[in-house]
Amino acid sequence: MRTDTPPPVRLVDYRPYPFALDHVNLEFFLEPSKTRVRNKMTGRRVFGEHALMNLHGENLKLISIALNGHILPENQYEQTDEGLNIHMPAGEFCLEIETEISPEENTQLSGLYMSGGRFCTQCEAEGFRRITFYPDRPDVLAPFDVRMEANKEKYPYLLSNGNPGKSGDIGTDRHYAEWSDPHPKPSYLFALVAGDFDVYTDSFTTMSGKETPLAIYVDKGDYDRCAYAMDSLKRSMSWDEDVFGREYDLDVFNIVAVRDFNFGAMENKGLNIFNAAYVLADGKTATDADFEAIESIVAHEYFHNWTGNRITCRDWFQLCLKEGLTVYRDQEFSADMRSRAVTRIKDVIRLRARQFSEDGGPLAHSVRPDEYARIDNLYTATVYEKGAELIRMLRTLIGDTAFFAGLNRYFDTYDGQAATIEDFLNSFQLSTSENIKEFANWYSQSGTPVVTASGVYDSIARTYTLTVGQRTEPTPGQPDKLALPIPLRTALFSNKGRRLSTKLNGEINDEHLVVLRDFEQVFVFTDVSSAPIHSLNRGFSAPIKLKDGLNDANRSTLAAADNDPFAQWEGLQTLARGLLIDLASNEDGSMNDRIHAFVDAIDEAFTAAIDDPAFASLILRLPSVGELIQDQNASDPSKFHAARLTLKRAIARHIENSLVATIQNQETGPFDPSASAAGRRALKATAIDLLSSLQNEHAQRISDNFHSATTMTEILASMNALGNIEGGGAEGELFDNALTVFEEKWKDSALVMDKWYSVQAMSVRSDLRARLQRLCARTDFDLKNPNRVRAVAAAFAMNNPVAFHAPDGWGYEFLTDIILKVDGLNPALSARLATAFENWRRFSSDRQIHAEKQLRRLDDANLSKNAQDIITRALA
Ligand code: 0A1
Ligand code: ZN
């Protein structure tokens, strides 16, 4: 075990930087093995008696330092593992530092690195210090001027933040370009790209009439796969003007797609850098999920221009200030572009899968934590997704008018600055008469509140007394929990399924906002005409776990009657969850009546939803194994898998004809990426999945569908289904045959081949271990490419719980082997993979023994600080 764990970074230790930078001038002499960086910072000491200036620096070769035009003598500065400390005079300064770096040796993909022969950068959170010595903290803002010089033939495009300036040739084979970003920014938003690309261009005229050229830079040959990303960008720009009143603020906007990237994308000012997987799409190579992700990530990065760039974070504890708000904005955008109900359902599925499991395990932390060991590990579902839920709740609590007034006040007050959550909340407090003081506790308290509800009807007084309580389990470092303000959109239905108009707090309505502020509270509805069934947390108005005290019959009534599609879906999910959990521990057939009742309820809702195929497909979706095991102890994922299979079979048998007809429904005409066409394909994919639960009965049909399908969504759905039809013989051959055909067709397209890898890694079949080993031995399995590693390791560990948690521990061992190999190359990636162990203590004791063995193996391996942080917390 590591004993030299460094002390954590603490929010209470925040101190403003004593120096201000007025201007930064960067010059790059780009060579893959030796890039020279000249950094000229002008500024002043703002306060403080100590004249020591701390500059961060990592993996840099220092060439020279000059202060106010003179070479700095060595006794005037000190170089440490973390950077430079320089003795500075009072007043203004001009500091010039020259360093050398080796982009081609940078496999961490943080700082300046090479991808596909091109230079690119990733500076958030602390990558800029791998480029030059600098106060690499988000509260030091400066306007940047950048000059790049490089070989002209190899790197014809030279890009950076802001607006383009002069460019020209130098001698015969080199050239230069200058960029100037007038908006003061922190170093994490710096970006540089140099290389040869296909360039897809367009333009957008902003609300004040300014025509802004837009460009997407992609690998040569990928030009035809840019249209959807460009269209998404233009729709995002327009939506941000319409809904939030925010206009773009530079002369150009550029996006660059790179093959090797640790995350989805990065919002660098005016020069967003993307993982190519979230830019490139066409009707042949991309699934509808890809189109949807591209739309939302392009929007997300663009929206950061205001929420993150114009107003940034004072320190990294405030990360949710930009991320939670920006995720909220991109979710609203997707809801407006697509179906609001379907978008909300998908957001909730994701929240439950990723954030609830994080919040319930050893890696739980609050949306704004008090301390962290490694900043890279704070880019979590909690900061992003729960952070977005907090914004949504705030809006529900204070109403639309105060919400937009508060947001505008925030933009007006903090534009050009680095802000805190307090600044943000204060902007809303000044715009509403609601007291939102307690709301701040949502930011500091971790864990998912469990809300319980029960009601009593008084037929004489015509009242319904609803008792609602909340409890949050202890989480690491937080044994005692506060009561949080929880807004619950609530409706009452008659037992015939009619929505009742009732009175609460003097207001008559058929839906009320019940705000639970204490640990337990009683709400009395009056004018209640008959014994009601309550429907709580409609639209998932709060990120909680609800125990609403209803029985299956109540739920079926609500599911059939509710006109709110989210509530209807949620009712069926709750029904399914209860049934699956019971089914997993009852193998004796005693559940048949409940199964039949459930299948009838699903059939009714499905038939009613048939005109909205996207929604209909979600009606047919059962909670995932990952979701089902969350609240269980000593769990065995294979039992939940078997329970799901039983229920899927029952559904499939019941609506078999309709599912077969859905599959046979061939689309004609050119590919249509719209939400409605995607909805039809989603339903088809669900039909394929359900029919595959009947094993070889429909295997041939699914295989035929694979061969005749024209869209990637259907092709992948068929391959997935074949992968899960267990058994050797013909069915196994159908899967392998499909894989061979697919590989032959797409072997030269890395992003498509990632799907080929993932389908196999996610398949539940007895030959999986050997299959995974074969995959990892292939020459195109590149440990330096995060997409490829994730296509195998993350797909397996995060999306194949049955195999990953195999009782003999081979899944844990397989992941550990990969983490050990990746860690030396890319710590951000290995740490992310290690989070798959987060809930290891929830599993059966045999599994825990194997998981712990592998965690100890990792703990002993002297891993990177990032990976070690995850392992230490998982083992604590
Ligand atoms: N800020 C970017 C993505 C991002 C994620 C993690 C990072 O470092 C660990 C850095 C950037 C976004 O939200 O899109
Ligand atoms: Zn973001």
Image: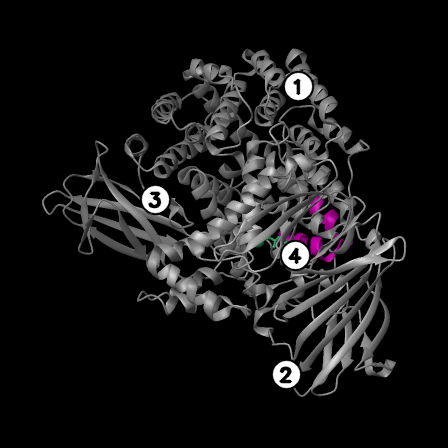
Please name whichever residue, 86 or 694, is drawn nearer the observer in this view of the structure.
86
Q: Which residue is mark 4?
A: 376
Say what amino acid the circle numbered 3 marks: Arg
Query: Which stretch appears magenta?
Result: 853-876
Comes first in the chain, label 1 or label 3: 3
Comes first in the chain, label 2 or label 3: 2
Where is residue 562, by image quadrant?
top left
Comes first in the chain, label 4 or label 3: 4
Say what amino acid the circle numbered 1 marks: Phe
Q: Position of residue 796 (x, y in %)?
A: 65, 35
Residues at discs 1 and 3 in contact (Cβ within 8 Å): no
Q: Which residue is mark 1?
A: 735
Question: Which element is circle 1 on?
Answer: helix
Comes first in the chain, label 4 or label 1: 4
Question: Which element is circle 3 on?
Answer: helix
User: Does the magenta stretch mainly form a helix, a strand or a loop?
Assistant: helix
Please name whichever residue, 788 or 360, is drawn nearer the observer in this view of the structure.
788
Q: Which residue is mark 2?
A: 46
Q: Residues within 10 Å of mark 1 (few under 14, many from 20)?
A: many
- Calculate the distance from the C-alpha at mark 4 to the C-alpha at mark 3: 34 Å
